[in-house]
Image (spheres, rainbow, N blue to C red):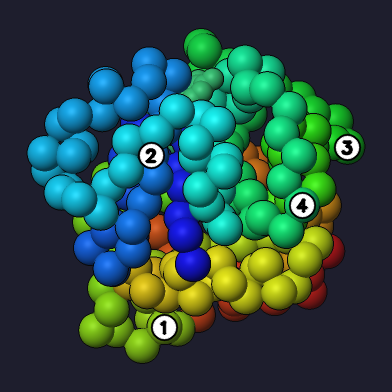
Amino acid sequence: MKISIIGSGNIGGNLARLFIKAGYDVALANSRGPSSLRDFVYELGGKLHPVDVDGAVTYGDVVIVSIHWRSLDSLEVFNVPGKIIVDTTNPYNEDGTFYDLGTDISSSKVIEHFRGGSVVKAFNTIWFKHLAETGNKTLPVEERRVIPIAGDDKSAKEKIALLIEEIGFGPLDTGVLKDGSKLQGVQGILYNRELSVKAARTMIKDAKITK
Ligand SMILES: NC(=O)c1ccc[n+]([C@@H]2O[C@H](COP(=O)([O-])OP(=O)(O)OC[C@H]3O[C@@H](n4cnc5c(N)ncnc54)[C@H](OP(=O)(O)O)[C@@H]3O)[C@@H](O)[C@H]2O)c1
C-alpha cells in the first residue's frame, strides 16, 4: 500500500512520521513544493519522498488530504478512480468559526476535487498533539484512542482501519459519509473527545437510544 499526504502541517506532517515509523514509504506534498520539505527528509530519511501535489496524487494508493477545508478550492480537480482519498478536513474559517454547511457534508468538496476516488473521512476528530503522542500498539484495539472513520466504500474503510491500527489507534466505523460525518464533524459527539473505541461505541449507542 503506497501512501501519499497532501499537506505537511500539524496533521499531515505527524501522519508522515507515524506511517514511516510503521514501515511505510510516504510521498509528502505541500503548497511550497518539494524543496521546502528538506527538514522532513533530514528527520525521516529515505522513506520520505518529497513531491509536488501532482506527484502525490500519482504515487499513492491512499492519498491523505490534510489541508485546510477553505484551501481545497486551490487544488486542481483530479481523476482518481481506484484510489482511496482520506479526508482529514474540518470546515473552519480563518477566525476559528465554522462554516454552516446546512445538510451538506464537508467531504463533498473533497469528492469534487478527487473524482472517482473512494473518500474516507478520518483523522479529523483528533488534536494533532494527541495524534503524535497517544497511539499505543500494546493496548487491545478496543482500549486504544479512537479514530472514527466514515465512508461509502466498505472495502476502502477496511483498508484505512488497518492502517489506523498499524499506527497504534483504534478505528471505529461510523457509517456512510452522510451519517458518519454527523458524528465526526465539528458539531458531532465524537469531535475532539479523548475516547477509547469502547467508550465511543457506547456513546454512539446511547445517543441513538435517547433520540
Ligand atoms: N490541527 C489539528 O489539530 C487538526 C485536527 C484534526 C483535523 N485537522 C484538519 O486537518 C487539516 C490540516 O490541518 P493542519 O492543522 O495540519 O493545518 P496546517 O498545519 O496549517 O497545514 C496545512 C498544510 O496544507 C498545505 N496546503 C495548503 N494549500 C495547499 C495546496 N493548494 N496544495 C498543497 N498543500 C497545501 C500547507 O502547505 P505549506 O506548508 O506549503 O503552507 C500546509 O502544509 C485541516 O483541514 C484541519 O481542519 C486539524
Give the mark toward the camera: 4 or 1: 4
Residue under pointer 2? 28
Q: Position of residue 94 (x, y in %)?
A: 52, 13
Q: Earlier in the sequence, mark 4 or mark 1?
A: 4
Is residue 76 shown to the viewer in this render?
A: yes
Residue 147 place in picture, x, y as percent: 49, 63
Give the Cα distance between marks 4 and 3: 26 Å
Task: State whether residue 85 is above or below residue 200.
Answer: above
Q: Which residue is painted at 35% across and 31% down in the image?
A: 9
Q: Is residue 141 left or right of residue 16?
A: right
Q: Secondary structure at mark 2?
A: strand
Q: Is residue 39 above or below residue 107?
A: above
Name the residue tied to disc 3. 103
Relative vertical location of residue 124 with respect to residue 155 in this rendering, above or below: above
- CA–CA distance between discs 3 and 2? 33 Å
- What kind of residue is marked 4? Pro
Callout 3 environment at 10 Å: few (<14), some (14 to 19), or many (20+)? few
Q: Position of residue 68 (x, y in %)?
A: 53, 26
Q: Residues within 10 Å of mark 1 (few under 14, many from 20)?
A: some
Tell me which amino acid carries mark 1.
Val
Query: Which residue appears at 55% of the width and 31% of the height?
Result: 54
Residue denoted by label 1: 141
Q: CA distance from mark 1 to mark 2?
A: 28 Å
